[in-house]
Each structure stands twice: as structure tokens, then as C-alpha cells.
Amino acid sequence: MKLLLVLSDDKNYTIIQNELTRLGYESVRYRHISKAMDNLEEIDPSGIIIGAEDFPRHWKIMAQFSGIKYPVFLFSAKELNAEEEAKAKHLGVNILSAGNISGLVESFPNGNKLPEAEIVNDGLQKDISFVFTYPGDLTFITGKVTAVSSGGLSFAPDHADVVKHLRSGTELNDCSLRIDDKILSPVCRLANEKSPLGINFISFAMDEKEIFDRFFNSLT
């Protein structure tokens, strides 16, 4: 998941970027809102975070300009006044603060589903399956792949209580992804801790990424 950050304040950028890294999100930063708007289609982000204090007037313009296609989040280091909150609500903009960035996943219109390039697993169980070892012990976590994207998958564990203590940002080093008759071993990161789990791929072994890409492209 890639987010566009439109922030000129370095302190606020550091706060947000640290949390996004923990959650396993990629990001692209622009200090000027006009440049961000010029490159929006090329970046094609999953969502946009704009600094309220950085752009007190222009955040509304960008929300109107891009909010139809991209979810927009307004970051404020201090509490917004009632008028600004009402404007954000009217424009369908979600408000983020330093204390609730981790709730970003829940704010997406698609909820826990992976954004962009998602293929819902409707009858694909014979083609793809996923299992991982719980970090710190040897428990195998089995379940059902409910959707797959170019950068990860959604995974519904067979026993949700076994993974209830996992947190977003946790790296999963012992994973097995079966595609047809091939077993891949990607390194993954938990992007969303609520079921279905959002699993992002961090890396594949040498030729495994090509195998996955061929499989995904065959679905689209």
C-alpha cells in the first residue's frame, strides 16, 4: 500500500512516517501541494495524507480535486475547530492525529480489503493457499486467502483467536504461498491485524516474484 504525503512540516512528517513504516506502508512525500496534484495520476496512491496546518486553505481544494478517486486523510497535530471538522466531514475527508494514525486501515472505504488491483478469491482455493508460522513459536497459522493483489493478500485464519495478539507491522519471516503446484516463500509484513488479515509482500526469493506475477496477471 502506497500513500501520498503532502506535508511541509518535518516534525509532522517524521511522526507520520514512523507510524507508516511500522504498519508496513510505502509513502511518497511532497512539500508543495501543487506539485503533488501535478503528479497524482503518476503516483496513483492508495490514499493521500495532507497536513492541515501546512495547507489551511488548500487542503480543501485537493480534497475536492482528488477525493473522488483517492481516500483523503487530513492530519492535524492539534485539535481542529468545529468549522474545519464540519468541512472535512462534508468533503468525505478522514481526520488523523498523532494518536490515531494506526487506525488508518479502518478508515479506508474498503475496510479491511486490500485497495487497488484486488482480485477477490471467488473459487480460487484450488489455485492459491497461504500459511505462516506464528512469530516466536512453531504454531502454523492456516486459513483461507480471500483476496489477492499485486502486493499482498487478504487472509482469514481458521482460528482467529490464535492470532489475536498479532499487531500491524509485524514481520512474518516463515511463510509459504502455494500457487498451483509451486511453493513460494515470501517474507511478509502484517498490514492489518483485523480479520481478514492484510498481508503485504516484502520480498521473494530470486525467481519466485516472477512466478507470482505471472499468476496474478493471469487473473486480471
Image (tube, helix red, strand yellow):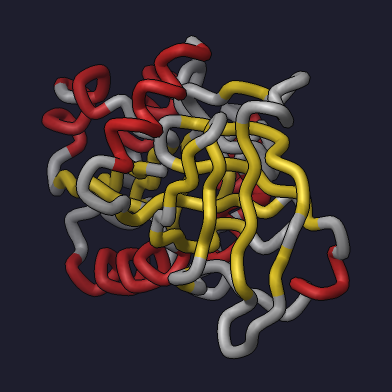
**Above or below, comparing residue 150 to residue 174 in the picture:** above
**Above or below, comparing residue 189 to residue 98 in the picture:** above
Q: Nearer the viewer, residue 206 or 113?
A: 206
Picture coordinates of residue 191, whole percent (x, y): 53, 57
Q: Nearer the viewer, residue 187 or 24?
A: 187
Picture coordinates of residue 180, whole percent (x, y): 56, 30
The residue depicted at 36 percent of the width and 21 percent of the height is 214
Picture coordinates of residue 8, whole percent (x, y): 18, 55
Picture coordinates of residue 172, whole percent (x, y): 49, 69
In which quadrant of the rendered view does residue 213 lie? top left
Q: How many numbered markers are drawn? A: 0
Can residue 86 be seen in the rendering of this structure? no
In which quadrant of the rendered view does residue 217 lie? top left
Q: Nearer the viewer, residue 213 or 170?
A: 213
**Above or below, comparing residue 17 to residue 157 in the picture:** below
The residue depicted at 56 percent of the width and 66 percent of the height is 102
Q: Nearer the viewer, residue 172 or 10?
A: 172
The residue depicted at 45 percent of the width and 23 percent of the height is 216
Q: Is residue 192 left or right of residue 49?
A: right
In which quadrant of the rendered view does residue 164 lie? bottom right
Q: Quadrant of the N terminus?
A: top left
The residue depicted at 20 percent of the width and 63 percent of the height is 9
**Above or below, comparing residue 163 to residue 215 in the picture:** below
